[in-house]
Image (cartoon, coloured by chain):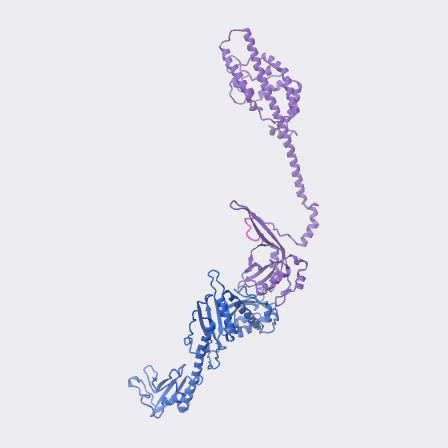
Chain colours: A blue, B purple
């Protein structure tokens, strides 16, 4: 029941209500964390048990918000599908939005499939204001919020979740979720083989958790959308600095932003550099090119010949090229190793400098077919050879 | 706060709700009253506890959802009045029924509740939430209900009690304090009530029973009065008897003295030992008489004697004086002798002796020497002689011999006395001639 796929859920919903739920389940993304879709669970019916199905008209909607998941009950009536739904806001029993601030409720239109989704978004906005209001329990955290709000870069993309004050310990916690204003548009397109995992919008979210009202225990975390994460080299590639004690968000967030921006720029530059490198090699060794990565420009394979001796040269460009030197791998077309693989040898000690441009690198690589240097082309030792491939 | 709802109202709400194929709502009608409980204990001065009790008498279901509010939850007062009509002032809350949902007030319910509280002018408007939870295979359905008091913090929940719903194995069937507001009921009672109720609204049977009770009470009171009277008369008679006994004893004493003087006069020598033997009895008799007379235990009689009877007593005393000649006649009686003295017949009790002197009635002298005084006490002559005075209150009825003698003596007394006794006599009989009362008289 809890891990029901959206389609299964839709099939159980009363037919009159299905269009409303479709847009919620399939396209529903509210809030900053758009990677997680809205989910519905616990489908129940308000009709008598004798009513033939499908007739479910009430369910629980899971909404990601500020690092938490809100579980709201939405109650329709299958017998009166034209009527707007009612809501139970889970544990937030004191959250009572003003109906006049919910235009899609006041002018509920059951014929509009987007109506429910829009209403939920309006409710989230109201909920956000309610949580910000609750920050008044702690002046310190309220200051953090107000200072961020003033900055146009961060104020508009902010989600606050103020935890309940622990009446026993007096502890009060809060969660801040910020969308970092970093431009990811120039990052190379990342194509996933699995289309079900639609990465959606490229976004970087900074999640800061205040475990106490005086901001002495602050734990920041950076969440990146999958493509960004992959583009930047995985989750381990990017480390954000710890929150400085006594510091505040308005100083910390720009730091993280800058760090991320730099990283992105570096990656973008790397991409361009790689492209330039490949292009240069293509122009130099155009006839000897076997294949190359035309999207990420991370790989290039050449077939070179020296004195009737053919050799494959694989060029692997690392992510942080040109900082990191590309790897040249020479692979024999004749000889196998004992494990049945083609004999290959990695070569890293060749003239290289990150400051050279692509052409220069191509030249200095000195992979000329007609004048290979002895150090670049070596014949395999007999001990390494198990089989030969005669040309 | 406490709340109660009658069983039939509750079942009616459940019926309406369960038969609707969607959510259902309506209003609760009833009244709110304050109950003050004052408790006094040894440890503290009395403490008063004020409890607000909400009683649900009836409900007004709404025909459909959104019948008195719009999509935004704004209540339309006109529609509200159409639903409630003249029962608006009786509204104490409202209810909602929804299947398979949490027992928590929803967003719209809270908004509506706030408005209803203001519009209806009921600050402590309650909200009753029914939820119907069914298991997945529809084998079990649970009807749950919670009464909220949203005016208080955290939507305080109030316990709703339904009289006679629950474990009644150890309790008797409770009559609910919730009145029956059904119009049909009132009509039927009005039509047929005259057969059972009188003009004051009291059941006729009750009045009849009360009349029987009153009659019985009157009778008991009358009987009490008669018992009292007869008891008083009896006491007076007893006093009379006591007095007469005293007089008899005195007379005997005088007779004895007279005889002694006569004998002394005839025989100046001192008598032998038998006389000495008798002296102690005489002295002892005298001392006993002297002892007995003042301390004769008398039956506790009424403090105030009716004048008539007191006069009669004095008359009796006067009448007894002439009969003081009886001692002279008594002087002719055989001298009382000590019991057990050989050759002398056992002296009969005084009364018996007196009876013999009269000779009017055959004194029932026993053939065997009467050794006792009839009540099992000591048969000593001294005691016996004194017994006429001593045992007055012990053998008033049991010693028939003495009384029989008194009866014969009664014949001697002037008619006045007889009349008095005759008047007193009926006291021994029951006033209504009831045999059972006779036994109780004694």
* Nearer to us in this view, A92 or A208: A208
Q: In the rendered image of this protein, does residue A284 appear above or below residue A321? A: below
Asked if residue B169 is among those painted magenta in the image, a careful observer would answer: yes
Q: What residue is drawn where x is 51% and y is 6%? A: B269
Q: Is residue A12 visible?
A: no
* Nearer to us in this view, B207 or A115: A115
User: Going by the image, does A381 lie left or right of B43?
Assistant: left
* Nearer to us in this view, A389 or A1: A1
Determine the main secondary structure of the stretch shown in magenta.
loop
Asked if residue B173 is among those painted magenta in the image, a careful observer would answer: no
Q: In the rendered image of this protein, does residue B169 appear above or below residue A199? A: above
Q: Is residue B212 visible?
A: yes
Q: In the rendered image of this protein, does residue A377 appear above or below residue B357? A: below
Give the magenta part as a residue range: B163-171
User: Going by the image, does B410 lie left or right of B374?
Assistant: right
Q: Position of residue A207 (x, y in %)?
A: 47, 71
Q: Position of residue B198 (x, y in %)?
A: 70, 45
Q: What residue is drawn where x is 68% and y is 54%? A: B184
Q: Position of residue A141 (x, y in %)?
A: 49, 68
């Amino acid at each position: 029941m809890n891990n029901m796929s959206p389609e299964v859920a839709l099939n159980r919903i009363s037919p009159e209500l299905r269009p409303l739920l479709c847009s919620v389940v399939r396209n529903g993304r509210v809030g900053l964390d758009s990677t997680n879709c809205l989910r519905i669970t616990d489908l129940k019916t308000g009709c008598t048990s004798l009513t033939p199905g499908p007739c479910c008209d009430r369910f629980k909607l899971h909404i990601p918000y500020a690092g938490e998941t809100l579980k709201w009950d939405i109650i329709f009536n299958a017998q009166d599908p034209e009527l707007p739904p009612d809501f139970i806001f889970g544990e937030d029993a004191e959250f009572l939005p003003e109906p006049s601030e919910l235009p899609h409720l006041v002018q509920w239109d059951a014929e509009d499939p987007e109506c429910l989704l829009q209403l939920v978004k309006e409710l989230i906005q109201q909920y956000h204001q309610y949580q910000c209001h609750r920050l008044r329990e702690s002046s310190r955290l309220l200051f953090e919020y107000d200072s961020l709000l003033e900055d146009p870069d961060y104020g508009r993309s902010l989600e606050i979740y103020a935890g309940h004050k622990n009446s026993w310990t007096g502890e009060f916690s809060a969660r801040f979720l910020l969308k970092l204003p970093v431009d990811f548009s120039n990052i190379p397109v990342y194509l996933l083989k699995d289309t079900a995992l639609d990465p959606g919008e490229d976004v970087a979210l900074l999640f800061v958790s205040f475990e106490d009202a005086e901001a002495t225990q602050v734990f920041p975390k950076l969440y990146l959308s999958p493509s960004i994460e992959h583009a930047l080299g995985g989750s381990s590639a990017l480390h954000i600095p710890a929150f400085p004690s006594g510091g505040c968000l308005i100083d910390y967030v720009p730091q993280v932003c800058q760090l991320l921006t730099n990283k992105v720029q570096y990656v973008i530059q790397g991409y361009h550099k790689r492209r330039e490198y490949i292009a240069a090699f293509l122009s130099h060794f155009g006839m000897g090119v076997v294949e190359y990565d035309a999207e990420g420009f991370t790989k290039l394979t050449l077939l070179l010949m020296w004195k009737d001796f053919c050799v494959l040269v694989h060029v692997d460009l690392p992510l942080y090229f040109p900082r990191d030197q590309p790897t040249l791998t020479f692979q024999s077309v004749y000889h196998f190793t004992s494990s049945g693989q083609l004999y290959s040898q990695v070569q890293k000690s060749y003239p290289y400098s990150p400051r050279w441009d692509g052409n220069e690198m191509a030249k200095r690589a000195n992979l000329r077919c007609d004048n290979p240097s002895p150090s670049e082309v070596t014949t395999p030792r007999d001990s390494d050879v198990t089989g030969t491939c005669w040309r | 706060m406490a709340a109660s709802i009658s069983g039939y109202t509750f079942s009616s709400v459940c019926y309406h709700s369960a038969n609707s194929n969607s959510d259902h709502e309506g209003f609760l009608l009833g009244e709110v009253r304050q109950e003050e409980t004052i408790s006094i204990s040894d440890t503290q001065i009395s403490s008063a506890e004020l409890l607000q009790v909400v009683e649900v008498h009836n409900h007004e279901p709404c025909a459909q959802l959104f019948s008195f509010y719009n999509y935004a939850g704004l209540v339309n007062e006109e529609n509200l009045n159409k639903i409630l009509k003249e029962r608006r002032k009786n509204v104490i809350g409202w209810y909602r029924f929804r299947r398979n949902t949490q027992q928590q007030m929803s967003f719209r319910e809270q908004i509506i509740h706030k408005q209803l509280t203001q519009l209806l002018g009921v600050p402590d408007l309650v909200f009753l939430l029914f939820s119907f939870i069914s298991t997945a295979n529809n084998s079990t359905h649970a009807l749950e209900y919670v009464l909220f008091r949203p005016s208080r913090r955290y939507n305080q929940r109030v316990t709703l009690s339904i009289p006679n719903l629950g474990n009644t194995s150890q309790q008797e069937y409770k009559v609910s304090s919730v009145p029956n507001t059904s119009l049909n009921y009132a009509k039927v009672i009005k039509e047929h009530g005259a057969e059972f109720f009188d003009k004051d609204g009291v059941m006729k049977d009750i009045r009849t029973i009360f009349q029987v009770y009153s009659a019985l009470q009157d009778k008991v009171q009358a009987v009490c009065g008669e018992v009292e009277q007869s008891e008083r008369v009896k006491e007076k008679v007893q006093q009379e008897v006591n007095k007469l006994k005293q007089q008899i004893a005195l007379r005997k004493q005088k007779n004895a003295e007279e005889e002694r003087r006569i004998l002394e006069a005839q025989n100046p020598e001192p008598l032998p030992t038998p006389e000495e033997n008798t002296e102690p009895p005489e002295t002892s008799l005298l001392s006993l008489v002297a002892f007995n007379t003042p301390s004769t235990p008398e039956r506790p009689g009424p403090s105030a004697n009716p004048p008539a009877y007191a006069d009669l007593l004095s008359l009796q005393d006067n009448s007894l004086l002439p009969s003081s000649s009886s001692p002279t006649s008594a002087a002719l009686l055989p001298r009382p002798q000590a019991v057990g003295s050989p050759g002398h017949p056992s002296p009969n009790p005084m009364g018996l002796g007196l009876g013999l002197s009269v000779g009017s009635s055959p004194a029932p002298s026993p053939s065997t020497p009467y050794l006792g005084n009839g009540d099992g006490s000591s048969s000593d002559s001294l005691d016996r002689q004194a017994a006429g005075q001593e045992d007055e209150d012990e053998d008033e009825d049991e010693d028939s011999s003495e009384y029989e003698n008194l009866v014969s003596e009664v014949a001697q007394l002037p008619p006045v006395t007889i009349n008095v006794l005759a008047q007193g006599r009926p006291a021994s009989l029951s006033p209504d001639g009831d045999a059972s009362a006779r036994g109780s008289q004694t």
